[in-house]
Amino acid sequence: MGKKKKKKKDIIKGALLRSPAAEDTMEFKGRFEKHHDELRWLYMELYDNGSMFAELCGRLAQFYEERGSALKALDRKREADPDWYKQNDMLGMMFYIDNFAGTINGVKEKLSYIEQCKVNYIHLMPFLETPKGRSDGGYAVSDFRKVQKGLGTMEDLESFTAACHEKGVNVCMDFVMNHTSEDHEWAIKAREGDGEYMSRYFFFENSYIPSLYENTVPQVFPTTAPGNFTWLPEQKHFVMTSFYPYQWDLNYKNPRVFNEMMYNFLYLANRGIDVMRIDAVPYIWKELNTQCRNLPQVHTIVRLMRLISEIVCPGILLLGEVVMEPEKVTPYFGTPQKPECHMLYNVTTMATTWHTVATRDVSLLKKQLDTVFGLPGEYLFLNYLRCHDDIGWGLDYGALAQKGMEERAHKKYLNDYFQGYAGESNSRGELYNYDPVTGDARFCGTTASMCGIEKAGFEQDSTAMERAVQLDVMLHAYMFVQSGIPVLYSGDEIGQVNDYGYKEDKDKAGDSRFLHRGRFDWDLAANISDRSSVQGKLFERLGQLEEIRRRQKVFVSSASVRTVETWDASVLCVERSFGGEKMVALFNFSETEKTAWIEVEDGVYLDLVSGSNVQANGMKVPGYGFYYLKKA
Ligand code: GLC
């Protein structure tokens, strides 16, 4: 009798151990124990506050518990295959929900179009609650747990991410952690003089300390929002605002800020987000007498975020928005033992690409690519021709100086060129944040407008249109041969041009970035199967390139990549090798035919685009033409 009873108990115990809840607890415990020491070490180093650390740990367990079972299953799958995002089949697209399809549910209905574009990674531009007219394109968040009215609800988001996952589409969102909107509940309480909330920002009674900061801190928006502080006349205080005056910088020296922002991060992660774009990450830690960018504590915080996500939601990728010079960017990958971000933007390459378009000289781009290709294979970059922001001319001016190009004059040339004033330019676009003191300005325009599609369309010049489409396709072909994930700005796949309508909207008129953030034109998209239309030509040709990229293993991120000398100033050659396969790609950045004398293995090569066999050396590359040549 006793024996029997014992057996029954054992069976119950065994079942309990194997129950999903018990397995979950074990899983959480395992991950937590793995990372606890480092998490605690870093947290205490920053905050030296044991009770806040204990609170954080308790909340991690809670967020893990709340995480849906489908997401947990995805986490497990990705933990078992940590390179899941480094293959050659990832293609991204970014868009504003309202511009693309009105609402989150609208985007859901358009998932078939996204699939048609062969896109399996979508970046939904900021969609959380933000005050109208003081939103900085959504980057001034007033509630991290609410979707902006008119776009949908958190439930819509959850059902959207689930629908995406069913189709194998990953969803990226912005986590704007450097600042909140001045309408965020913390800011409202701080404004009322509540010290607890004032301490979550940087408040100063007079201009003394702010003026000390101004001595060393550069300006982000020198024209549209000069200075780094805003005077609040009613509160009789200055508040730190590195971006717009309505974006109040958060004070991460306060552990309450860190903890609460991590809870927001996990709350959003649990809605089914796959990629968190950490907005403006270099700025999140401030110290007097520094530039308040890229300080060591920023890296501690990013590492803490990485550990937190490894514990609660290891399927999530961190994408750092680090728009800085190359030597400042790569440290955000961390080290192999202590990784920080999974992915970063290939920003210098993007800017250097447009410099190459304007100069028809690939030497700087070749140098830049050599640097990127020489980085450890684990580093994964997001490659892009355009994003929602301006193009800043962050080039290697040391290298350009050796060619007699001086920074200020060259930036002016590039801005003139892309406005269509200089050289053999067919580009159209506008300046952004022209600074009369430094003479500096950045640039806005869509890829198609910068390639000449807008001008050719306006002038109804079919020869110029052919050339512009050719340049546009060549640039995409070139982007695809870089390692990492290529991301299209929605509309680029159909050659959408600048939208000057923003000037009529008083909430947007002051910010020329809205020039390239126009509404997606579904009427134009209806032409994609008409091969005589610009949309049809671009869509078909980009589609073909995407298909090649997916099929050919040489495109994987871990392939070895190098540039090859072509002995022509305008022709770039990139060679990719993987698993015994080799591909040589040639790109002509000038409008005239060039011959490329490249030193690559002799023999017959297959042109992956046309399907014909060719000899790679001595190839004649048409104006704005390109080749993907695979060693047969
Ligand atoms: C990032 C965004 C940009 C925004 C800024 C402030 O740089 O990309 O659009 O203005 O952060 O949040």
Image: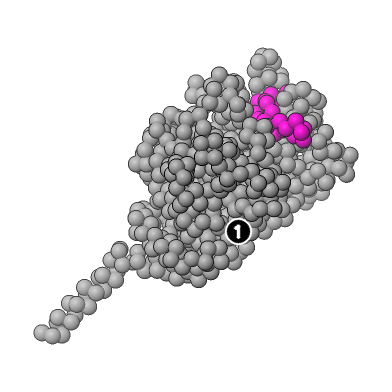
- Residue 502, visible in the rendered structure: yes
As drawn, the residue found furthest toward the bottom would be: 2
> Furthest-top residue in view?
460
| Residue at 46 percent of width and 68 percent of height | 50
Q: Is residue 598 a member of the stretch shown in magenta?
A: no
Q: Amino acid at mark 1?
A: Gln
Image coordinates for residue 43, horizontal then vertical, percent: 52, 64
Could you say where residue 490 lies in the image, as x and y percent from the top left? 54, 33
Q: Which span of residues is magenta-colored? A: 426-452
For residue 15, side relative to residue 446 (left or right): left
Residue at left offset 60%, top offset 56%? 298
The answer to whether any part of residue 528 appears in the image is no
Instruction: Identify which residue is drawn at 50% across, 29% down.
Output: 133
Q: Nearer the viewer, residue 239 or 321?
A: 239
| 579 over 598 or under it: above or below | below
**Residue at point 60%, 26% (across, down):** 510
Quick one: 177 or 70, which is closer to the camera? 177
Q: Is residue 436 magenta?
A: yes
Report the side of 232 relative to 569 (left or right): left
Mark 1 C-beta closer than 8 Å to ligand 1: no
Classed neighbour count for the residue bearing mark 1: other residues with Cα under 10 Å, few (<14), some (14–19), many (≥20): some
Can you identify the residue that label 1 sits on? 297
Write down the quadrant of residue 164 in the picture.
Answer: top left
Q: Secondary structure at mark 1?
A: helix
- Which residue is more in the foreground, 356 or 390? 390
What is the quadrant of the N terminus in the image? Answer: bottom left
Quarter assignment of residue 155: top left
